[in-house]
């Protein structure tokens, strides 16, 4: 994937919390060209990143709480007892979450860490939604005041160079997000990620397994139509 020029802008900074905006400065014409190019492709597509404005981020978090939507529920069950199996050092550990959303899954890992170790750990949530990062940072600060938080507003699909390199890093790519990619995109992304990881870094990758069609259809076509509202929200985003 082609790296994009980045601009750094500190959007929030307080004790133990810093949020930096690395989104590229791009004009409306660039966005229009990307969307039109996707709609002319076969098959037609719009990048999933356009789902996640403030409204879209809230709708997706609502989806994850639906009874039909099993991926989040199953993944959280796994995460609740996973920490000891990761064999990580606490000193200068960075937990990097790609597409962090409300950070609810990382909380499940943090709850397994002894409190006196938290001040040695930095949580690095990366998300395209600045509003989601600010909300998650506020919530985590209340629950874990000793935790260091370095939030990054960025489109991590194009560039990962802004991620700090100090200490061991646990990269978390959860929620089956890799399923949004076609096979070539997934391969390129994992190659990019692998190229910047060091030998002591770790990758925690969440993905779904093969399921009956009826289970998947129910999960992504819920009775309350929340997923439908989420999907249609992308039209509101690109038409702004």
Image (cartoon, rainbow, N blue to C red):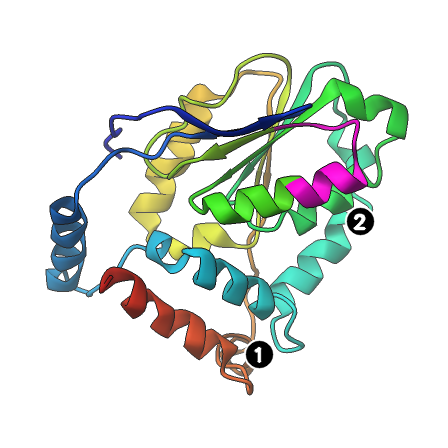
Res. 89 in view: no
Q: Which residue is mark 2?
A: 80
Q: Which residues are magenta?
A: 138-149
Q: Residues within 10 Å of mark 1 (few under 14, many from 20)?
A: few
Side of 146 where 15 appears, left or right: left
In this view, 89 is above or below 145: above
Q: Which mark is residue 134?
A: none
The residue that appears at 67% across and 42% down in the rendered structure is 138
The residue that appears at 76% across and 18% down in the rendered structure is 120
Q: Residues within 10 Å of mark 2 (few under 14, many from 20)?
A: some
Quarter in which the N terminus is drawn: top left
Residue 80 position within the rendered picture, expressed as x and y whole percent measured from the top left: 80, 49
Quarter of image, res 13 = top right
Residue 237 position within the rendered picture, expressed as x and y whole percent measured from the top left: 30, 62
The residue that appears at 88% across and 29% down in the rendered structure is 115
The residue that appears at 64% across and 17% down in the rendered structure is 168
In this view, 153 is above or below 36: above
In this view, 227 is above or below 46: below
Residue 209 position within the rendered picture, expressed as x and y whole percent measured from the top left: 57, 61
Residue 167 position within the rendered picture, expressed as x and y whole percent measured from the top left: 63, 13
Determine whether label 1 and label 2 are within 8 Å by CB: no
Quarter in which the C terminus is drawn: bottom left
**Depth check: 14 or 90 in front?**
14
Q: Is residue 142 magenta?
A: yes
Q: Which residue is mark 1?
A: 215
* N-term mark: 1 or 2: 2
Quarter of image, res 186 = top left
Foreground mark, 1 or 2, reads: 2
């Amino acid at each position: 994937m082609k790296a994009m020029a980045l601009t750094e802008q500190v959007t929030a900074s307080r004790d133990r919390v810093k949020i930096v905006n690395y989104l590229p400065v791009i004009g409306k014409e660039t966005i229009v060209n990307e969307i039109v190019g996707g709609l002319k492709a076969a098959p037609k597509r719009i990048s999933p990143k356009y789902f996640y404005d403030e409204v879209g981020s809230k709708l997706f978090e609502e989806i994850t709480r639906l009874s039909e939507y099993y991926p989040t529920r199953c993944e959280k069950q796994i995460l609740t007892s996973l920490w000891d199996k990761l064999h990580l050092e606490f000193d200068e550990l960075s937990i990097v979450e790609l597409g962090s959303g409300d950070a609810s899954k990382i909380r499940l890992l943090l709850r397994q860490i002894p409190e006196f170790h938290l001040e040695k750990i930095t949580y690095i949530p990366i998300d395209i939604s600045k509003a989601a990062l600010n909300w998650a940072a506020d919530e985590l600060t209340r629950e874990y005041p000793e935790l260091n938080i370095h939030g990054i507003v960025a489109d991590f699909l194009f560039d990962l160079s802004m991620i700090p390199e100090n200490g061991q890093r646990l990269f978390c790519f959860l929620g089956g997000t890799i399923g949004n990619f076609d096979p070539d995109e997934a391969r390129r992304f994992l190659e990019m990620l692998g190229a910047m990881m060091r030998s002591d870094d770790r990758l925690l990758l969440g993905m779904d397994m093969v399921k009956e069609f009826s289970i998947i259809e129910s999960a992504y076509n819920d009775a309350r139509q929340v997923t439908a509202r989420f999907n249609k929200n992308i039209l509101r985003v690109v038409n702004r």
